[in-house]
Image (cartoon, rainbow, N blue to C red):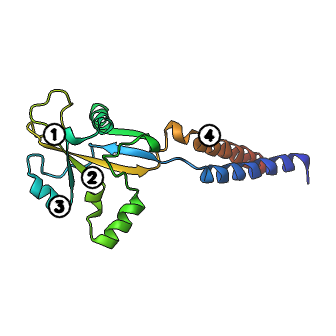
């Protein structure tokens, strides 16, 4: 085997190892808060209708200070806000997708409603941002809360992305050089 061939094979092998490492690097889940998700058509509805559809309702005034802070931060950031797993609020359940599916299978809950909480907004409160619903006098704002991996292009996934890019570069360069030999 020629010397150039062994170097190229080593690069290809390194690329495969780096891609495999990128696939198994653990990524910590985050707590998601999302008011921009599809909102049910009940902004001016009543609590009985919401509970009938399986939604938990929490009055804004009854949220903990941390719950209020996260809700307001979600509204101020355009409807999506994420925090590390240990920094959520006890007001929100943060189920994982597997938890919701398992719970829905056992208790007949609507899986979609189980991941949401309806925040009952105070009347005429100027100290919180406007609700995401297009209704001017929106009384409820739905917040999707869940535990899930962070989006691909975030700092939490940087090691994974860097390993994948290095693997692709090694695989691509080694493979192309090997093909020309």
For label 2, the crowd category at 10 Å Cα-Cα, with few meaning under 14, some 14 to 19 and many 20 or more, is: many
Q: What's the distance in space between the residues labelled 4 and 3, CA to CA? A: 44 Å
For label 1, the crowd category at 10 Å Cα-Cα, with few meaning under 14, some 14 to 19 and many 20 or more, is: some
The residue that label 1 is drawn on is: 121
Q: Which is nearer the N-term, disc 1 or disc 3?
A: 3
Residue depicted at x 66% and y 54%: 20
What is the number of the mark on residue 162?
Answer: 4
Q: Secondary structure at mark 1?
A: loop
Q: Nearer the viewer, residue 160 or 149?
A: 149
Q: Is residue 99 above or below residue 69?
A: below
Q: Which is nearer the N-term, disc 3 or disc 2?
A: 3
| x and y, in percent, of residue 63 in the image | 25, 41
| Residue 37 visible in the picture | yes
| x and y, in percent, of residue 160 in the image | 59, 44
Q: Nearer the viewer, residue 145 or 175?
A: 145
Q: Secondary structure at mark 4?
A: helix
Q: Nearer the viewer, mark 2 or mark 4?
A: 2
- Image check: 50 left or right of 97? left
Q: Does the residue at mark 1 contact the one at mark 3 (Cβ under 8 Å)?
A: no
Residue depicted at x 8% and y 38%: 137
The residue that label 3 is drawn on is: 53
| x and y, in percent, of residue 155 in the image | 52, 36
Q: Is residue 11 above or below residue 49?
A: above
Q: Does the residue at mark 2 contact the one at mark 1 (Cβ under 8 Å)?
A: no
The residue that label 2 is drawn on is: 116
What is the number of the mark on residue 76?
Answer: none
Q: Nearer the viewer, mark 4 or mark 3?
A: 3
């Amino acid at each position: 085997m020629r010397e150039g061939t062994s170097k190229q094979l080593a690069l290809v092998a390194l690329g495969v190892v780096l891609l495999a490492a990128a696939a198994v690097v653990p990524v910590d889940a985050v707590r998601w808060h999302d008011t921009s998700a599809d909102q049910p058509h009940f902004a001016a509805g009543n609590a009985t209708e919401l509970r009938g559809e399986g939604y938990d309702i929490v009055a804004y005034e009854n949220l903990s200070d941390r719950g209020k802070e996260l809700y307001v931060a979600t509204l101020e950031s355009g409807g999506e806000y994420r925090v590390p797993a240990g920094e959520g609020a006890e007001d929100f359940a943060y189920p994982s997708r597997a938890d919701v599916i398992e719970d829905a299978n056992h208790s007949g809950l609507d899986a979609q409603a189980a991941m949401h909480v309806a925040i009952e907004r105070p009347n005429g409160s100027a100290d919180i941002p406007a609700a995401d619903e297009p209704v001017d006098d929106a009384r409820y704002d739905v917040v999707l809360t869940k535990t899930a991996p962070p989006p691909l292009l975030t700092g939490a996934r940087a090691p994974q992305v860097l390993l994948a890019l290095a693997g692709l570069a090694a695989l691509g360069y080694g493979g192309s050089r090997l093909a020309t030999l």
